[in-house]
Image (tube, coloured by chain):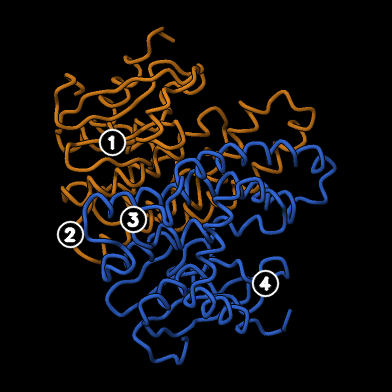
Chain colours: A orange, B blue
């Protein structure tokens, strides 16, 4: 529910991205978490296709999104923002220490064990597709990603969510897996695909996705 | 100071890795943090070159290191472990909210903005060096990494550490930058290289590195 610019929470997002990135931009992770706990937020929009204002680097040093400001603290990196919100609301991060640190481990695993393997595919398929070696590299990177997906699926097992109740770990893992929605790689991991579908069916995700898509200046 | 197996804290580490990985394995991040606060720890050693015991996956789902157990919680992912230790000791994570969340943002930036760009180079130079396209891909991946390093250096500016006092953000960024020690890429970023040298000069880092190197069964 992104309503106005005077809400206490402000996040940065893009209002213009290449078509492949629509619905995948990382502000989705923060929008989703805020929807889960019913918090309003205002938006600071930037054009991903243009140079960012120099002063934006003070808020987000890489010129990326999302950055976050609630009048108390300013932070950046979707993982850091989800940890901050999780600390404020147990619907995002359980208070039981074992569950809390399992969720934190899985949030980090999504960001540093799974996403780097998937981003190699994204880089190749979208940013490096014109390289003469891209077609040869693609199956090699897909194989590397399969190793991480296999381990992730095995760890999930029969469970509904990664760390007990639904948490920021599930938000992050779902959004990370969405990076390869343009491929059929995930279909070889049915339990993981079912986990992702279960998470994407949550009303909070649906609202967050619709709001991200509605924010682009030119409809897809 | 890894002394015995009965210490309250146990971490997993490798006692056998390919030569290029010596001094770079991720248990270094946790060893360093523990040295900074003078905490003893015991080691659970595994051979990186052999299949891991199936039960180890219950502790570290990807069969990697480090995993952590202090009798209170079990966790994995170096980033999660540093956050856990940071919560216990302000010498690792300042208590001032602005500094605390800046440090958390930079820890996550090291893991999800900088490391994925550097790992592409590591993957190419060590794991994919035999691919016929590796030589063509190398400068492309180096260029992608340069973008992240440039932003990181600009954000550091004249500061000694990334978020006020020395913190887990600096441990993580230093260890992430070490991934490309086999190249001269970092030399184009003198402030960042000086930051890394400053961090590596800390006695706690030196002890942690010496202990990791001493743990390998066959000397380098």
Mark 4 falls within which chain?
A: B
Q: Is residue A43 left or right of residue B197?
A: left
Q: Chain of mark 3?
A: B
Q: Secondary structure at mark 2?
A: loop
Q: Chain of mark 1?
A: A
Are both tags, 2 and 3, on one chain? Answer: no
Residue B24, above or below B209: above
Residue closer to the observer: B111 or A35: B111
Task: Give the foreground label among 3 and 1.
Answer: 3
* Label at residue A68: 1
Check if mark 3 and mark 1 are on a common chain.
no
Identify the secondary structure beneath mark 4: loop
Q: Quadrant of residue B20?
A: bottom right
- On the image, numbered disc 3 is attached to which residue? B164
Q: Residue A93, relative to residue A97: is it above or below? A: above
Instruction: Report the residue marked by disc 2.
Output: A95
Q: CA distance from mark 3 to mark 1?
A: 19 Å
Residue B65 placement (x, y as % from top left)? 52, 68
Query: Could you say which disc has been placed on residue B17 in the image?
Result: 4
Q: Are marks 1 and 2 in contact (CB under 8 Å)?
A: no
Q: Residues within 10 Å of mark 1 (few under 14, many from 20)?
A: many
Marks 4 and 3 close (CB-CB < 8 Å):
no
Q: CA distance from mark 4 to mark 2?
A: 37 Å
Q: Residues within 10 Å of mark 2 (few under 14, many from 20)?
A: some
């Amino acid at each position: 529910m992104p309503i106005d610019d005077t809400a206490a929470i402000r996040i940065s997002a893009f209002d213009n991205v290449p078509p492949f990135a629509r619905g995948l931009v990382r502000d989705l992770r923060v929008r989703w978490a805020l929807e889960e706990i019913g918090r309003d937020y205002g938006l600071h929009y930037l054009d991903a296709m243009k140079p960012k204002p120099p002063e934006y680097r003070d808020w987000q040093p890489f010129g990326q999104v999302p950055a976050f400001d609630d009048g108390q603290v300013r932070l950046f990196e979707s993982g850091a923002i989800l940890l901050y919100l999780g600390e404020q609301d147990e619907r995002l991060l359980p208070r039981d220490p074992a569950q809390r640190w399992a969720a934190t481990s899985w949030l980090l695993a999504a960001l540093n064990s799974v996403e780097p393997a998937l981003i190699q595919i994204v880089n190749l398929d979208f940013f490096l597709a014109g390289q003469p070696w891209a077609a040869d590299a693609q199956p090699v990177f897909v194989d590397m990603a399969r190793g991480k997906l296999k381990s992730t699926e095995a760890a999930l097992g029969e469970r509904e969510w990664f760390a007990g109740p639904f948490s920021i770990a599930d938000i992050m893992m779902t959004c990370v897996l969405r990076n390869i929605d343009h491929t059929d790689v995930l279909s070889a991991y049915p339990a993981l695909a079912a986990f992702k579908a279960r998470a994407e069916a949550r009303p909070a995700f649906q609202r967050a996705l619709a709001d991200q898509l509605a924010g682009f200046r030119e409809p897809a």
